[in-house]
Amino acid sequence: MEIIDFYTGSFARRCIVLLGYFDGVHTGHRALIEHAKKIAASKKDGEAVGIMTFYDGKRDGQIYLFEERVQIFASLGLDFVFAAPFHEEFRSMTAQEFLVRVTKNLNVGAFLCGEDFTFGKDATGNSVTLQEFGKANGIEVFVDKIVAFGGEKAAATQAKRLLRSGDVEQLARLLGERYFICGTVETEGRHIGRKIGFPTANIHPSPEKYPLKQGVYAVTVRGDGWEYRGLANYGSRPTFHDASVVLEVYLDGCFEDLYGKSITVFFDEYIREIKKFESAQQLSLQLKKDLEKIR
């Protein structure tokens, strides 16, 4: 899968382009992607499918960072990502300027978006604007109905609400797969977990990532060709007087050296709140109880 830069890249093959922000890649987004793939397959010679997204995020944080979204898009079989920086120059483009730029860089055969899609400076462009542009330029435009979830529109705001509450099971249903965090295991630390019988792989989540509720979670961790169940402490470590937010993961049955390696942590279930224990030994006893719950 290729990554095409909004300002400097190009894609010569005839393609269908999905327009939106695609922060959380939820069930509504997945429905759009599947529709686009069906349209592409119906074409005589087949067409590529690409998706618009942004390198950076909105001010309150991203559900998935750019690299994580790219990982999802690749798994869903897309051919390219059309990526733009969400800076002032981009935000100041009119709807017409935006569409001209897209069709200059990409060989667009069709656009596909949700019926609530808006674009251009001050969000003055919408699906009707897109249809008018398509008609004038010989480009097909498909506008899909909004997908509902839990009695409301499937949306990033809904996903962020579930992140704040720690309801990762409901979040997985909204997103279409378990919520995850990618990162590189830190090579330095105090190794306290190892001393109490629970060696951990630690990741400092990016400040650009929308925060998950602090707590202890049942997780599944994947690396290069392996997978383990485990426990994750997302947040502070009050027993050791550490207020910084860390994703600290114990992999049940793993004895490999993970320092410096990339891992993906999937959140399966919220177990309990973070507690301050009187001693490391008491923490160890609680972790043993937590471990029994996930085995």
Image (cartoon, rainbow, N blue to C red):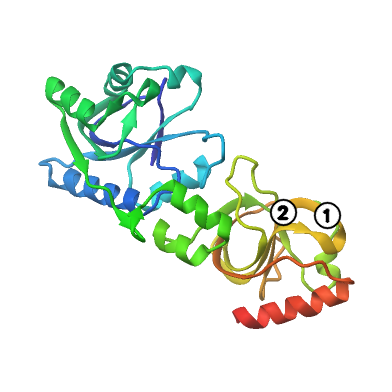
In the foreground, 206 or 278: 278
The quadrant the N terminus occupies is top left
Query: Which amino acid lies under the numbered mark 2 shown in the image of this protein?
Result: Val
Q: Residue at 73% across / 65% down in the picture?
A: 274
Quadrant hosting residue 235? bottom right
* Front position in the image: 147 or 10: 147
Give the residue pinned by disc 1: 242
Spot occupied by residue 39 in the image (x, y as percentages of width and height): 17, 45
In the rendered view, would you say 154 is above or below 199?
Answer: above
Point 29% across, 25% down: residue: 125
Screen quadrant of the C terminus: bottom right
Disc 2 is placed on an element classified as strand
Left or right of 164? Residue 76 is left
Relative placement, left or right, of 237 versus 216 is right
Mark 1: which amino acid? Asp
Q: Is residue 38 above or below residue 252?
A: above
Instruction: Give the residue displayed 65% in from the left and 48% down from the top.
Output: 205
Q: Which residue is mark 2?
A: 246
